[in-house]
Amino acid sequence: MALIVQKFGGTSVGDVDRIRTVARRVKQTREQGHDLVVVVSAMAGETNRLLEMARSAAPRPDERESDALVSTGEQVTAALTAIVLQGIGVPAHSFLGHQVRIETDSAHGRARIRRIDGEQIRATLGRGAVAVVAGFQGVDEHGSITTLGRGGSDTSAVALAAALKADVCEIYTDVDGVYTADPRTVPTARKLDRISHDEMLELASLGAKVLQIRSVEFAKRYGVKVHVRSSFNENEGTWVVEEDPSMEEVTVAGVAADLNQAKLTLVRVPDRPGVAAHVFGPVASAGIVVDMIIQNASADGTTDLTFTVPRDDYDKAKGVLERILQEIGGEGVRGDLGVAKVSIVGLGMRTHAGVAARMFEVLAAEGVNVQMISTSEIKISVVIDAKYVELAQRALHEAFIA
Amino acid sequence: MALIVQKFGGTSVGDVDRIRTVARRVKQTREQGHDLVVVVSAMAGETNRLLEMARSAAPRPDERESDALVSTGEQVTAALTAIVLQGIGVPAHSFLGHQVRIETDSAHGRARIRRIDGEQIRATLGRGAVAVVAGFQGVDEHGSITTLGRGGSDTSAVALAAALKADVCEIYTDVDGVYTADPRTVPTARKLDRISHDEMLELASLGAKVLQIRSVEFAKRYGVKVHVRSSFNENEGTWVVEEDPSMEEVTVAGVAADLNQAKLTLVRVPDRPGVAAHVFGPVASAGIVVDMIIQNASADGTTDLTFTVPRDDYDKAKGVLERILQEIGGEGVRGDLGVAKVSIVGLGMRTHAGVAARMFEVLAAEGVNVQMISTSEIKISVVIDAKYVELAQRALHEAFIA
C-alpha cells in the first residue's frame, strides 16, 4: 500500500463530466489499496475569468483581494470533486489551503510555500477517505489567502507529496509526458521514460510548459518522485527522478524553444567599471527579469551591452534604458522582438566535450546565425532570429537525439 | 462618529457596475466620518448556479462540500467590493467567515452562529479601512466552512452589528422598507416608518420576505437597531426597533400572506391519548416542520387531525402519514395543496379586544371561509382557500390599516 498524490490540471477538471472521469481514476487507484491525496486546479478558463473580473473592478486590483477572488476557482473544483467521489461511493473530504494548512509568505500572486501541516490530511487518510486539496492556494501568517502563481497547483502537489512523504506524485496533464522536443514542431520527438530533476529544471526554465519550475525545485530538494502522465489514457508517462549514473550516457535529453523573448542593446555606451551595475540596477528595480547578457569587446572606449527580457516587459525595459542612456551617454537603444531562444539540455554534457561546437556547426549548416550564447553545466542556449525557431529545433533534435 | 454595518443583497451587488454604486454609497457614508463594516451577499443568481452545479455532480451532494462550494459566491463579491472601494480611494479589507471569525455549529446549510470574534475587524477599522465581510458564511469548530441558510447574510450583518456594538445595521434591499402588506397585491399598502422586533418577527415568519427570521431574533436579543432601506435611492426606510409604549396605539401593523402551505388531514383516527404524539413524532423525525395543528372534537371515539406543512414537504409528509395510518387505524389521509395562510400582526392586539372577531367578520363579508385559525399575543393567522389570498389581504388591509 502506497501513499499517492495525484494532481489534475484545469483541462482534466474542465467540467462536471471530466471530473467524473477523474473520480473514476481515483476510485481505481484507491481500489488497488493505496492512500490518495488529490490536488485539483480551477476549471480550465476559470482563473482567467476571475482575473478579468478583478481587472474590470479596478485597473490595478489589490493583490490580496485578487488572491481571495481567484482562489475560489480551485475551491469550487475541490468541493465538486469531493461531491462526485462521494457520489460513486468513495469517501472524500475537501481541503482549502488554510484548512490543510499550507503556509506561505505574503507575496500575493506568487507566494512561496514555507511550511505544510499534514495532520488534518493524515487524519482524513486514516479514516479511509480521499483528501481532495484545492491547488494553487495557501494562507499567510495573517490568515490571508495567497496564490502560488501560474501552474502553482503543480507546486501544491509536489510540496504536499514532500510533506506527507508520499511514494509518488502523479501530475496528470493533457500530454503523455515530457518529450525530447515539442512534438508539434519536431515530428520525431519522443516521450522520455525518465529525466533527472536538473534536466527537468532546465527544460522548464527554457520554455517547456509541462511543470511549474518551482514544483521541480521542490521535487529535487525533497527527493519526490514525480510521474508526469496523461489524464486521458493509462500509459506510463515520464518519471522525473533523482539522477543516476546511467543518465550521463545520454548527451542531450531534450531540445527546448522559447519565443517569449525580446532583445535590447545599449549601443556604444562608455566602457568603464560600474556601467553594468548602473544599467541592471534600475532594470531589476522595475521588476524586469533579465535572462542572457552579453557585452561586446570594445575598441574605442565604448561597448555594446545586449540582453534579453520576457516579451511583455519589452516596452517597460526600453523606457528604463532610454532614461539610463541620458545619464551615462551612448549612441542609442536598439530593440528586437523577432528573436527566439533555442536550447539543448542533458546531463551528458558534463562529460562530453565539444557539444557546444557541434551545436553551432549544426545551426551554421542550416544558415542560422547565432546572436547570443549562454551555457550552464548541463545546457546550451542560443538566441537566434525567430523565423528559424522550428528549423533549429528540428536540426538539433536530428543531430543529437533522433 | 458612529459604527455602521451596511448589508447589500444579491441584487445590489448583481454585477461590477452595481458594486460600483454600492461603493459610492459606502464612500459617502465614510466621508460623513463613520466607521463602516460592509456585508455582501453573492451576486444575484450565483448561489443557485453553484447549487445547481453541486446537484449535477451528485443527486444528494454532501452538505459540508456544498457549503464549501456555495460560499465562494460571497467570497467573490467581498473581494470585488474591496477592489472597487480601493479603486475609488477607499481603503478596504475583505474578510471571509473564518477570517472574522464567525463561529457556528456544524449544521451545514442552516448553521447557527455561536460566537463572533470582532478583533480583526476592529483592527481594520482602527487603521481607517472599511471591513468588507462575506455574508452567509461561517466556520465550525473543525475549521469547515458553513452557511447560514437562505437570507443568511441578513443574520451575518445583524450578528456582526451586535458583536461590534454597532450604532445601526442598515439592510439595503430592492424595496423601500417594510410595508403594511405586499404592495403588488394591496395597492394601498404603505411603508412603515418603524416596527417592533416582535412584529417584524411575526411578519417574517408569516411570509414577508424582507428579512431572515433569525436576523430579527438577533436584533431583538441584542437590541440592534435595524434600518431596512432601498439600495437604489436615499429615502429613509423602515426602522426595526425595540418596542415603545406608543406602538400599542396601532392595532394592526401589517398583513402578511404565505402561499407556501399545504394542508393534511388524518381522517377519523382513534381519539385516545398518545395519538398526537404517535403522529407528530415520526413527522418531526422526517425533518418536516409542522405549522398549525387543529384537532376536531370527536363524537364517536374518532377524531380528524389536521395540520399544515411547507409545500415542498407535502409528498414526504403524506408518505409518513400513510405509514402511521397502518399502525393506528383510521379512514384515510386527505391532502390539500390549494390553501394559503393570511395573517394580521400588531402589538395593539394585546390591549384591543375583539380583533379576531372583526377579522372573521371581514373575511365572511367577502365570502371567504376560514379553515384553520392560529393566534399568538400579537398575531392572528387563518388558513383559507388559496384562490382568495389576494382578496383577503386587501379586505383585511382596508379594514384594519388603510
Image (cartoon, coloured by chain):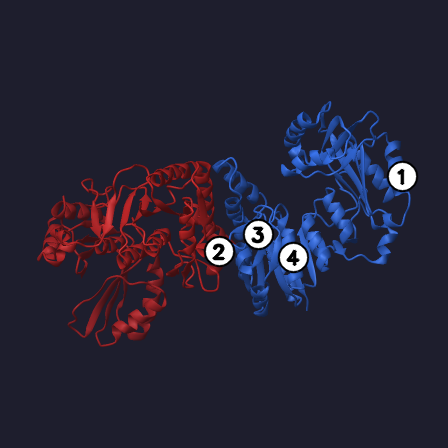
Chain colours: A red, B blue
Real-space CA distance between mark 2 and mark 1, rounded to the nearest whole angstrom? 58 Å
Query: Which image quarter holds the N terminus of chain A?
Result: top left
Q: Are marks 1 and 3 in contact (CB under 8 Å)?
A: no
Question: Given the current orientation, which residue lies at the most extreme top position?
Answer: B331
Real-space CA distance between mark 3 and mark 4, rounded to the nearest whole angstrom? 12 Å
The residue wearing badge 4 is B159
The residue wearing badge 3 is B137
Q: What residue type is disc 3 on?
A: Gln
Kind of element beneath mark 2 = helix
Q: What residue type is disc 4 on?
A: Ala
Query: Mark 1 falls within which chain?
Result: B
**Residue B357, disc:** 1
Residue occupying the point 22% across, 56% down: A198
Q: Is residue A84 left or right of residue B324?
A: left
Lower sequence index among marks 1 and 3: 3
Q: Number of callouts in the render?
A: 4
Give x and y (percent) for residue A68.
48, 55
Question: Given the current orientation, which residue lies at the most extreme left position?
Answer: A353
Q: Is residue B170 left or right of residue A91?
A: right
Kind of element beneath mark 4 = helix
Real-space CA distance between mark 4 and mark 1, rounded to the nearest whole angstrom? 39 Å
Query: Which image quarter holds the C terminus of chain A?
Result: top left
Question: Given the current orientation, which residue lies at the most extreme right position?
Answer: B353
In front of the other: A219 or B77: A219
Query: Mark 2 falls within which chain?
Result: A
Give x and y (percent) for residue B176.
72, 50
Query: Mark 4 falls within which chain?
Result: B
